[in-house]
Image (cartoon, grey):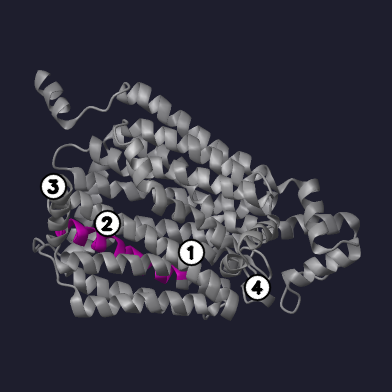
Amino acid sequence: MKNNKSTAIKTSVFKKFPKTFWISNTMELFERWAWYGLFAVLALYLTNSTDEGALGFSQTQKGALMGTVTAILYFLPIITGALADRLGYKKVLIFAYLILSSGYLIMGSVSSYVLVYLAFLWVALGAALFKPVISATITKTTTKETSSIGFGIFYMMVNVGGFIGPIFSSKLRGAYGWKIVFIMAASAILVNLILLLLFYKEPYRDETKDTLGATIKKSLINIWTAIKDMKLLIFLIIMVGFWTMFNQLFYTLPNFIDQWVNTKVIYDSLADISPALAANIGTKHGTIAPEMLVNLDAGAIILFQVLISTLVMKWRPINAIISGIIVTSIGIGVAFGTSNGFYLILGIFIFAIGEMASSPKFTEYVGRIAPRNKEALYMGTAFLPMAAGNFLTGFLSGNLYEAWSDKVSLLKIEVAKRGLEIPEIANGFSQNDYYNRAGELMGMDQQQLTDFLWNNYNPSKIWMVFSAIGVATIIGLLLYDKFILGGKEQTKDEEEKVEKAK
């Protein structure tokens, strides 16, 4: 009888969500499908050999492009959120979808560095228009009673879309080449445009008589007001380290797997268990694509986020964040510290556990320390460390990776040492041509060449930098907890009592 009553209550809560809530969640799923369908393979597309349909850019170029553009994407919602409040949600979403769909198509059609950069910047503008509007719609279509489960559904859609996208892009690019990835992303966005035009109903919002310029100015002033709170500002600065380490999963790990990790052993082990499973997951070359392995992170979150969130539910947010970053630092070290595919999988899984503990608590903590009635204002600052983290990630994934771990760069050093004459990589002579020619002159096949470079140049040493960033973040948070918080976050009511006592 009790179970029936509980089920009835849960069902009644679901019935309280309006249609626009479900449409918004569906649009979030498709937008994440498009974004992660591209972003999970973007590092490979930018840097891999041109004879495979990729662009053949350097790692430094890749880092600069991904880092600066994605940093801009996470900073812009401060402005675009105010824009949506002024112009209306539906109108801004129409602009967002038109920009995103055209941006994805243009990005897949150009090959020069400048044009690819500008096209990705156009995509970032569309994503920045989308982000605050869809979150605000979820807020406005839930109540105090339904908000908890409503945002739970929303974050599930984020992860489901982020999981499905890379699977589709991996299988499609393997079968039809790189261009289909961009067509897939644009198609997912056009599905959203149809849903928007047919089913989305503009939520209620307070009308403002301010001009557009005044609205944006007010938004920037509000952010400045929030970050003048030293407790918040110091925390946000420290958390830049977490996001810098976290982003290596998408910026750097796909390149590292592609260049150094022997994924054939994983494929062969799967084939021993189930040839059909191996064929569905793997490539036609009998390997596992890097994006499929990186996608284990999103898969683990879908399966275990509720469990991990339950385990850390009663922890102080700062303790959960510190514990999570300890685990992610270990995971990133294991993932980058070996060329063994099975240790790589273990590292990604460990990383995911830490991410599940720390990332949701980051948002919770920002809301926890916000003064009463300023929660939304403080939550708007949560994008700032993400923006700064993406910017720094670009340098580490670009300049540092190229100097320490890039297979092309290390091979060029060895070729110069031996005095071998090989044409420079350019139009008509690809990365793969360079690898093959170097292997011939050095008397090695491609696996032997990879093993030689691995053993003599130690490209895995980059793990020490990534894990050290995590350790520095942990130390920063421990000092913050001890000297700023005094080992305890005060609730808003406690803060008010302290103020009255003064």
| Rendered position, 52 above or below 447 | below
Marks 1 and 2, how far apart at CA: 23 Å
Magenta span: 120-141
Marks 1 and 3, how far apart at CA: 48 Å
Q: Which residue is mark 4?
A: 284
- Dividing the picture into quadrants, the one containing residue 164 is bottom left
Q: Which residue is mark 1?
A: 39
Between disc 1 and disc 4, whose residue precedes? 1
Q: Nearer the viewer, residue 378 or 221?
A: 378
Between disc 2 and disc 4, whose residue precedes? 2
Q: Circle 4: is it few (<14), some (14-19), or many (20+) Cα within 10 Å?
A: few
- Asked whether disc 1 touches disc 2, contact meaning CB atoms under 8 Å apart, the reply is no
Q: Which residue is mark 3?
A: 1
Q: Nearer the viewer, mark 3 or mark 2?
A: 3
Between disc 3 and disc 4, whose residue precedes? 3
Q: Circle 3: is it few (<14), some (14-19), or many (20+) Cα within 10 Å?
A: few
In this picture, residue 220 sits left or right of residue 211: right
Residue drawn at x 90%, y 59% is 419
Residue 134 magenta? yes
